[in-house]
Image (tube, rainbow, N blue to C red):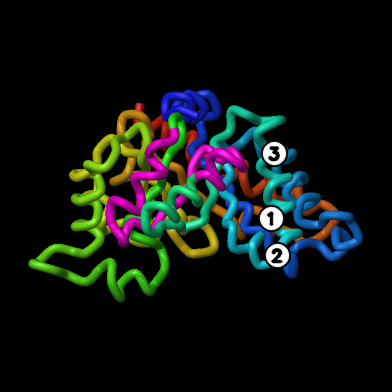
Amino acid sequence: MKVKDLIYQINSKSSFLCIGLDTDISKIPKFLLDEEDPIFSFNKSIIDKTNKYCVAYKLNTAFYESLGTQGWISMGKTIDYINDNFPELFTIADAKRGDIGNTSKMYAQTFFAKMNFDSVTINPYMGSDSVKPFLEFENKISILLGLTSNTGAKDIQLKKINNEHVFIEMIKSSMVWGNEDNMMYVVGATKPQYIEKIRELIPNHFLLMPGVGAQGGDLKEICKYALNDNIGILVNSSRSIIYASNDEKFANSAAIEAVKLQKQMKTIMFEEK
């Protein structure tokens, strides 16, 4: 998928919502455990009820990999279901990969060629040769970890070297590896005080912003600093949507929460025009 296609969806739906399918088998409704593939059954129901209100789905691969072979099967069925039925939606493999060049090449093959995700999250701290194999794939997007939403970001990312934060130095170095058409950055919604500086460096790149919802990020606050002429952000919400309820109406409850966020986004987009 090209960035222009994502922008079209954002404007068509008045939404920049990304729903995280961080599907934990211990948290899904118990009645689904009788299904042949409980994880896929859960995901399919969520997708069917929420696709009208979001522009992207993000699959955190850890939740699938933790289940071994069956988890990979469930993840494959989920991405195939989205691609077959809702090809206009942007898909993210939240895998946080990144290794020496030949290994990164195999990771890129996995998520781009084999599984056909539109994008994958990458840890860029091993340098350019760990990222460039992903950038070789046409119409695929590499999403580099910039400033993450977790509290531990202070341990390294927010340290200062020569009076500059480590994450700023990483963005400065990495921004020349690709461009706004094949690279995005993860910027946590829980750290709005740094967004203005980030936008000065990369005004046109899309930002994937996790942390709204269960982690406490404020949608209006981050939009104040992060929006650009193309909106330029994907705001991810996972737990507060997919686990909105734990009964037979779980998918309808997820849709209700998705609509709430989409309506807020529509209002913000209207105010920006």
- What amino acid is found at the position of numbered circle 1 in the picture? Trp
Q: Depth-wise, is mark 2 or mark 3 nearer the camera?
A: 2
- Inspect the image, locate mark 3, and give the three-letter code of the amino acid beneath it: Asp
**Residue position for label 1:** 72
Is residue 168 visible to the viewer in this orientation of the structure? yes
Left or right relative to 44: residue 179: left
Q: Is residue 170 left or right of residue 79?
A: left
C-alpha span from label 3 to label 1: 12 Å
Residue 206 rendering spot, x and y as whole percentages = 36, 39
Give the extent of the magenta segment. 109-137
For label 3, the SS is helix
Which amino acid, mark 2? Gly
Query: In screen coordinates, is 15 left or right of 104?
Result: right
Q: Which mark is residue 68?
A: 2
How packed mark 3 is, by other alpha carbons closer than 10 Å (few <14, some 14-19, many 20 or more), is some
Calculate the distance from the C-alpha at mark 2 to the C-alpha at mark 1: 7 Å
**On the rendered image, what quadrant is the C terminus found in?**
top left
Dot placed on the residue nearer the N-terminal end, 3 or 1: 1
Q: Position of residue 225 (x, y in %)?
A: 29, 46
Nearer-N-terminus badge (2/3)? 2
Q: Are marks 3 and 1 in contact (CB under 8 Å)?
A: no
Task: Report helix, strand or loop for mark 1.
Answer: helix
Q: Give the label on residue 80, or none.
A: 3
**Is mark 2 in CB contact (under 8 Å) with mark 1?**
yes
Disc 2: CA contacts within 10 A as few (<14), some (14-19) or many (>=20): few
